[in-house]
Image (cartoon, rainbow, N blue to C red):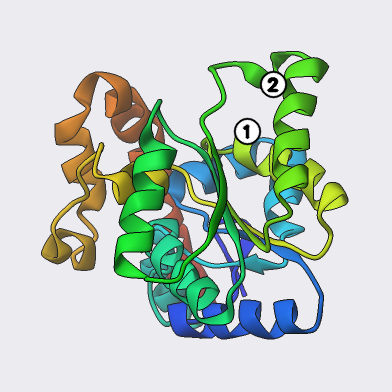
């Protein structure tokens, strides 16, 4: 189904994990994108970014406005499936199956801290590598190639990439060529959340669709313009347009 200009798979978190498990067992790799309002806004303005999202093997809704829009359209999705949650559930899968994982991104030290937290919760999880490349590492072909070589040499089966959209997704598209049998999750701030270096909103705020408000309160200077001037108007247009589409179809 299409929500916010992108095709979204109507899957629960458990179903995503089951799909990844089946594909890995069959020797097939893939990539997961978890669009929120900000990603949908960027994709709506740029056909290349829209293709980057829509060409993923699994696309599941991270943002509550997308969940609400799907309901208004009469084509509901089960709920949010966030990168911040999938990093834990996919790590649990990897621990059970003995599949090595790689953590790429986050602020300095976050990937190593996330690895410690993930292995603490999931005994037996094998983290085959962590890397926090410097800012603008991908400004040169040499910088990108160095990061790619490190990931490929570690031979992970699951790779969590937290560099923000679209940088993480462009890098993942390249890494798919190096590791066609691995699965990749573009997970934004999930590595920092897992490490505890960035606080995540309480559960009740996540369920109410207020996680953005918590993050805005935590980082107003960095997120203020994006959330209030860019994303909020887009979300309101998305919801109003979805309602209008539903009314016209009756």
Q: In terms of depth relative to the viewer, which is nearer, 71 or 16? A: 16
Asked if the residues shown at circle 1 and circle 2 are in contact, with their CB atoms under 8 angstroms apart, the answer is yes
Camera-nearest label, 1 or 2: 2
Toward which corner of the image does residue 157 lie, by quadrant?
A: bottom right
In the image: residue 208, left or right of residue 153: left
Q: Is residue 1 above or below residue 117?
A: below
Residue 186: give x, y in percent of width and height.
57, 50
Secondary structure, mark 2, is: helix
Q: In terms of depth relative to the viewer, which is nearer, 191 or 10? A: 191
| Residue on which disc 1 sits | 167
Count of numbered labels shown in the rendering: 2
Residue 109: give x, y in percent of width and height.
38, 31
Q: CA distance from mark 1 to mark 2?
A: 8 Å
Toward which corner of the image does residue 185 lie, by quadrant?
A: bottom right
Residue 25: give x, y in percent of width and height.
73, 83
Q: Residue at x 36, y 69 (%)?
A: 68
| Residue on which disc 2 sits | 138
Q: Is residue 111 above or below residue 2?
A: above
Q: Residue at x 39, y 58 (%)?
A: 63
Secondary structure, mark 1, is: helix
In the image: residue 167, left or right of residue 190: right
């Amino acid at each position: 189904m299409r929500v916010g200009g992108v095709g979204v798979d109507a899957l629960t978190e458990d179903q995503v994990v089951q799909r990844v498990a089946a594909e890995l067992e069959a020797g097939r790799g893939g990539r997961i994108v978890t669009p929120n309002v900000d990603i949908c806004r960027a994709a709506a303005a740029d056909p290349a970014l829209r293709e980057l999202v829509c060409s993923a093997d699994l696309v599941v809704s991270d943002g509550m406005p997308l969940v609400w829009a799907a309901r208004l359209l009469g084509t509901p999705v089960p709920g949010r499936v966030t990168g911040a949650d999938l990093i834990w559930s996919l790590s649990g899968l990897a621990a059970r199956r003995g599949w090595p994982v790689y953590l790429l991104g986050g602020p300095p030290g976050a990937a190593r801290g996330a690895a410690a937290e993930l292995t603490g919760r999931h005994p037996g999880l094998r983290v085959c590598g962590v890397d926090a490349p410097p800012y603008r590492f991908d400004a040169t072909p040499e910088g990108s190639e160095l990061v790619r070589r490190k990931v490929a040499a570690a031979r992970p089966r699951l790779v969590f990439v937290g560099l923000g959209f679209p940088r993480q997704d462009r890098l993942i598209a390249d890494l798919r060529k190096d590791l066609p049998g691995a699965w990749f999750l573009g997970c934004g701030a999930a590595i920092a959340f897992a490490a505890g270096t960035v606080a995540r909103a309480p559960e009740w705020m996540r369920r109410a669709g207020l996680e953005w408000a918590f993050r805005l309160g935590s980082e107003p200077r960095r997120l203020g313009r994006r959330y209030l001037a860019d994303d909020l108007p887009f979300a309101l247009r998305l919801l109003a347009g979805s309602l209008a589409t539903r009314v016209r179809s009756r």
